[in-house]
Image: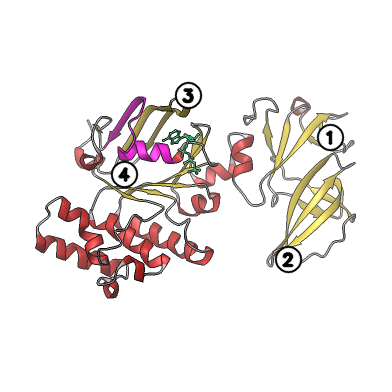
Amino acid sequence: MIAPHRLRGDIRLDGITKSFGETQALAGISLAARPGTFLVLLGPSGCGKSTLLRVVAGLEAPTGGRLLLEGRDVTGLPPAQRGIAMVFQSYALFPHLSVAENIVFGLRARHVAAAERQGRLAETAEMLGLTKLLGRRPGQLSGGQQQRVALARAVVAQAPICLMDEPLSNLDAKLRAEMRREIRALQQRLGITMVYVTHDQAEAMSMADQVVLMRDGCVEQDATPAELYARPASVFAASFIGTPPMSLLRLVSGQNGAEVAGAPGVTVAPAEAAGQLLGLRPEDVAPVDGPGLPGRVQAAEFLGAETVLTVAVGDGAEVMQVRVPGHHALASGTPLRLKLPPAVHLFDSTSGRRLP
Ligand code: ATP
């Protein structure tokens, strides 16, 4: 038996399903977040991220499965009895209330005493840099400030679990990057468990302790950002993470082993890999003077610190991307040779799963 205080912020989902009529939004989700974890639900539009978050919040009842928060089965409990705070994409601020009133609204509803409310309000406003804005209405704030008020409302509740659904999608790129760091720092400072929904892989990779990559209502991979990048479990995971994404090349049978289709004479993998897919991250490959995989530059995209080359391999049947540090103004058609890394990623061409 685990001591109750060790479970503060602990989340467990066991076979959660959810159908809307004919649509199965969640096809059996099991996962666990240990206390203090920043967990990101990542995946393309329609994969079920928001539905899953709403099930955890209690805004949506699952069709099947169990939800345990802090060791307690809360599957049938209403949102208010779950000990969670939530931040929505739209902020959901009351336009006719001041910033201060917006922040303490939930505390009032829960009949927290006035002195306690004031204390928590002052502390939270200070933490989020809102002290000077407490008298304003939401309409008198910038997008970033409104976002902070929404965060403050979650923080002031002192809930051990906080849920956020794409909270940064209404902000411009620079502010978004700033708020990412701020939310991550806040989560660590408060030691709360965060479940954060995004479709932005860079956001997921930079903020998360644990990424749950979803696809069609299922968990595709549940891993740390580093694991997800280094050992993607499938072609889907490999293609979803990384900019530019991993290149995937078809392998055929050659004289001494497997070769890239259209590039005979260069063995790139053991013979049994023929028929499967070879995965190469753009930074794992480099142009060389000596022997290597032959190709021709199709395009060179200069990004400042590096250049991304699009290279047609061999006779051009397969195309890949290569990341080269610095500026390289290579004309289209320039021939080159590529050195491959000692260990490559291999995927089953039918199932898309990673081969060990
Ligand atoms: P997005 O990033 O676009 O918000 P998502 O990954 O959050 O997508 P969900 O909003 O959870 O995906 O939707 C998952 C599936 O369930 C979709 O096919 C969606 O159309 C369907 N769905 C969600 N809510 C409802 C609803 N209230 N009624 C019917 N179908 C729904």
Q: Marks 4 and 2, Cα distance to the nearest angstrom?
A: 42 Å
Question: Which of the two discs, 2 and 3, sits closer to the camera?
Answer: 3
Q: Which residue is mark 1?
A: 261
Write the residue at 36% across / 32% down.
13
Q: Is residue 83 visible?
A: yes
Real-space CA distance between mark 3 and mark 4, rounded to the nearest whole angstrom: 35 Å
Rendering coords of residue 131 (x, y %) = 27, 72
Report if the CB atoms under discs 1 and 3 are less than 8 Å apart.
no
Relative height, residue 77 to residue 307 (above, below): above
| SS for callout 4 | loop
Question: Of callouts 1 and 3, which one flags the residue occurring earlier in the amino acid sequence?
Answer: 3
For marks 1 and 2, give the CA distance: 30 Å
**Is 177 a magenta residue?**
no
Q: Residue at x 21, y 68 (%)?
A: 122
Q: Which residues are magenta?
A: 50-69
Q: Height in image: 174 above or below 62?
A: below
Residue 109 vertical position relative to residue 182 in the rendered view, above or below? above
Whichever of labels 3 and 4 marks the residue nearer the N terminus, that label is 3
User: Which amino acid does the dot numbered 4 rest on?
Assistant: Pro
**Residue occupied by mark 3:** 22
Q: Which residue is mark 4?
A: 35
Query: Which residue is rendered at x = 65% and y = 30% of the image?
Result: 352
Which sits earlier in the primary sequence, circle 1 or circle 4? Answer: 4
Q: Which residue is mark 2?
A: 326
Q: Residues within 10 Å of mark 1 (few under 14, many from 20)?
A: many
Dot 4, crowdedness within 10 Å: few (<14), some or many (≥20)?
many
Work out whether residue 345 or residue 234 is closer to the camera in this orientation and state it.
234
Q: Secondary structure at mark 2?
A: loop
SS state under label 3: loop
Is 304 situated left or right of 101 in this image?
Answer: right
